Image (spheres, helix red, strand yellow):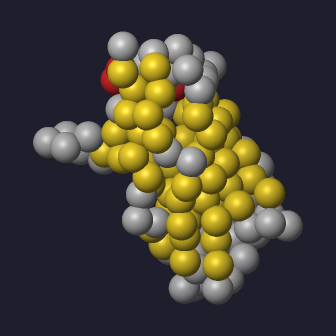
Amino acid sequence: QVQLMESGGGSVRVGGSLKLSCQASVYSTEKCDMFWYRRVPGKERELVSSMSRFGATNYTDSVQGRFIISRDDFKATTFLEMNSLKLEDTAMYYCAAGGTRWYCPALGPGTQVTVSS
């Protein structure tokens, strides 16, 4: 199966920006749908954004207008650009792949994003 590795997390002040990357290996994610999830301890995992293999995007309401998902299939990398970060964006962020291809289902180990005032 495809393997995913997130990077780009870190600590940032309220209003700041971060850009997460999700590097795929073993197989290309060109034929996969890509997702960004986040989880806060004690809460359910939340789907933040998705981008289909056809380029269609979706965002959860709380990040609409602030986050941008994109992908570079040539580099097998998916991005999540996060702007105007808020305290409530603090979470572990996970990249995931899905779709009908047998190798697509995958979840990365996550990268921590901490927003402070």
- Asked whether residue 58 appears in the rendered view, the answer is no
Q: Is residue 79 above or below residue 88?
A: below
In the rendered image, residue 31, in percent from the top left (x then y), is placed at: 73, 71
- Asked whether residue 44 appears in the rendered view, the answer is yes
Which residue is at the front of the view, 106 or 14?
14
Image quarter where the C terminus lies is top left
In the rendered image, residue 11, in percent from the top left (x then y), is placed at: 44, 34
Q: Is residue 23 left or right of residue 10?
A: right
Which residue is at the front of the view, 17 or 31?
17
Q: How many marks?
A: 0
Which residue appears at 42% of the width and 57% of the height?
110
Q: Is residue 60 above or below residue 116?
A: below
Which residue appears at 19% of the width and 43% of the height?
41
**Which of the 4 image quadrants contains residue 91?**
top left
Q: Is residue 6 above or below residue 41?
A: below
**Which of the 4 image quadrants contains residue 7?**
bottom right
Q: Is residue 41 left or right of residue 51?
A: left
Q: Is residue 96 left or right of residue 113?
A: right
Q: Is residue 74 left or right of residue 9?
A: right
Which residue appears at 53% of the width and 59% of the height?
6
Image quarter where the N terminus lies is bottom right
- What is the residue that sits farthest to the left in this orientation? 42
Q: Is residue 30 above or below residue 25?
A: above
